[in-house]
């Protein structure tokens, strides 16, 4: 593939900003050049320099837009893409009424394949280039998503959901079948191209102790493999979980005893935590994942980002579609900002953009490969236009600084603000 040279305003984070004005945490080039070759970022610098050194490269001029690393969504449910905006109730009723019936349809490989195409199309439209995804319990659903991502050379973390109780027959597996199906998917997909597998027990309510033990055995058999599940999202969920596991010290202890908690563990929600659970998160390096649109939509509660960060715990931030209400990481950080306002915490625009790029890459253990524009990393890129809508253009007339522009994108942006998305160096939207 001939090299491509993107021209525009390059923004990439080198570390987490330490305050709202910490400009030393990012690299910004006002007239930057980003050379893409063989799916990787080959060079970055002032446009004139890179262009002179690589006269053979085809130039794509994205000025005056911002060129950022592709956005990363570390908690999303693939089979819930049509569950977004299902009215009423909180978590457990919502699962029963809308979610489990929708997921049951993913037993059909043709449905799963068609939906995988549309899922990846929507992600690209929103500038999202990597997700950590729950599939349905049917192995065909994971097969469909991995196959679609491979076709696009898209970096993907995903797993077949393990769930053997407290749900309708059409979405249940067994401890043994979930072990066998997950093991087969790991053998087929983990480390193949850009795919990584995540061992995916849904949550303690829908997994028997035997199934969590099977999940622990899968995780132990493949060192470094991700584990994704849910933790302490909703008060009724926590009470039912305590009934099902009376011997556990608390919710997280259930997963700890099964060998499921470590630096590769992603714990969706983690809102209503006990002191011991917070200590254990800090000690194990496991990652809570903040899902603000979902937490508001399902009335779950307010995530304590600063409290966890103060303990050295590294949290992700994610859409949780379809409990979440948007595929957009911009919209997600807009709602994240508002949730944290209600806790007296003030998420800065630089911190928000760090979080949805490098921050989430670090949570996934992949910051050496995605989440920045550093040369040598994978060429996943989002091109953002802060004047994409009339309302945004009107507001931008009064924006003078980069953080102001980023905040307009965060608060007002969605897929209309994504001018282009590159996956492994290839444009995903019609130019
Ligand atoms: N807890 C267990 N399953 C789910 C799910 O699909 N969505 C959310 N938001 N929470 C869950
Ligand atoms: Zn979830």
Image (cartoon, rainbow, N blue to C red):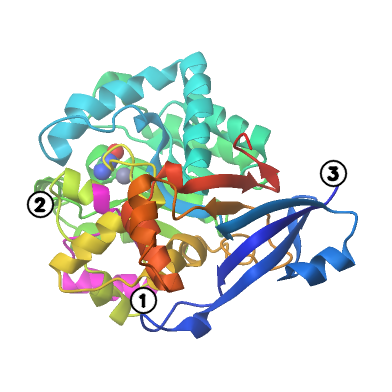
Q: Are there few (<14), some (14-19), or many (20+) residues within 10 Å of tag 1?
A: some
Cα separation between marks 2 and 3: 53 Å
Tag count: 3
Asked if the residue at label 2 sits under 8 Å from ligand 1, the reply is no
Q: Secondary structure at mark 1?
A: helix
Q: Secondary structure at mark 2?
A: helix
Per the rendering, the mark at residue 1 is 3
**The image quarter in which residue 44 lies:** bottom right
The residues colored magenta run: 270-293
Q: Is residue 225 magenta?
A: no
Can residue 210 be seen here? The reply is yes
Residue ID for mark 2: 235
Which of disc 3 and disc 2 is earlier in sequence? 3
Instruction: Report the residue at 33% width, 45% height from top.
Output: 320
Cα separation between marks 3 and 1: 45 Å
Q: Where ligand 1 lies, by quadrant? A: top left
- Could you tell me which quadrant the C terminus lies in? top right
Instruction: Report the residue at 46% width, 71% height from top.
Output: 402
Q: 274 or 244: nearer the eye?
A: 274
Q: Position of residue 93 (x, y in %)?
A: 13, 33
Q: For this view, does 288 lie left or right of residue 359? A: left
Residue ID for mark 1: 283
Which of disc 1 and disc 3 is earlier in sequence? 3
């Amino acid at each position: 593939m001939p090299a491509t040279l993107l021209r525009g305003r390059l923004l990439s984070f080198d570390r987490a900003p330490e305050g709202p004005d910490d400009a030393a945490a990012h690299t910004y080039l006002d007239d930057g050049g980003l050379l893409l070759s063989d799916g990787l970022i080959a060079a970055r610098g002032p446009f004139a320099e890179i262009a002179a050194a690589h006269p053979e490269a085809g130039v794509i001029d994205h000025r005056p837009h911002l060129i950022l690393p592709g956005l990363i969504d570390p908690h999303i449910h693939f089979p819930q893409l049509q569950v977004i905006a299902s009215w009423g109730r909180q978590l457990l009723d919502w699962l029963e009424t809308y979610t489990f019936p929708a997921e049951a349809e993913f037993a059909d490989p043709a449905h799963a394949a068609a939906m995988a195409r549309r899922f990846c199309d929507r992600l690209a439209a929103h500038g999202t280039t990597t997700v950590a995804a729950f599939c349905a319990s049917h192995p065909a659903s994971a097969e469909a998503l991995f196959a679609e991502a491979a076709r696009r050379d898209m970096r993907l973390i995903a797993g077949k959901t393990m769930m053997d109780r407290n749900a309708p027959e059409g979405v249940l597996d067994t401890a043994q079948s979930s072990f066998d199906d997950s093991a087969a998917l790991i053998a087929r997909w983990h480390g193949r191209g850009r795919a990584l597998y995540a061992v995916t027990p849904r949550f303690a309510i829908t997994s028997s102790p035997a199934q969590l033990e099977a999940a622990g055995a899968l995780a132990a058999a493949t060192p470094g493999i991700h584990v994704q599940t849910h933790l302490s999202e909703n008060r009724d969920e926590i009470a039912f979980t305590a009934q099902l596991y009376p011997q556990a010290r608390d919710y997280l202890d259930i997963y700890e005893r099964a060998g499921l908690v470590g630096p590769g563990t992603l714990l969706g929600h983690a809102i209503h935590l006990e002191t011991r659970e917070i200590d254990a998160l800090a000690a194990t390096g496991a990652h809570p994942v903040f899902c603000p649109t979902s937490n508001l939509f399902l009335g779950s509660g307010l995530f304590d980002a600063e409290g966890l960060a103060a303990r050295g715990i590294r949290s992700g931030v994610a859409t949780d579609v379809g409990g979440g209400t948007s595929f957009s990481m911009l919209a997600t950080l807009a709602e994240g900002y508002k949730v944290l306002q209600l806790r007296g915490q003030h998420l800065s625009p630089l911190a928000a953009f760090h979080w949805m790029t490098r921050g989430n890459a670090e949570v996934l253990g992949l910051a050496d490969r995605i989440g920045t524009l550093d040369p040598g990393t994978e060429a996943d890129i989002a091109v953002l236009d802060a004047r994409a809508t009339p309302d945004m253009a009107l507001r931008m007339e009064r924006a003078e600084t980069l953080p102001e522009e980023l905040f307009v994108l965060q608060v007002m942006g969605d897929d209309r603000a994504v001018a282009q998305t590159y996956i492994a160096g290839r444009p995903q939207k019609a130019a």
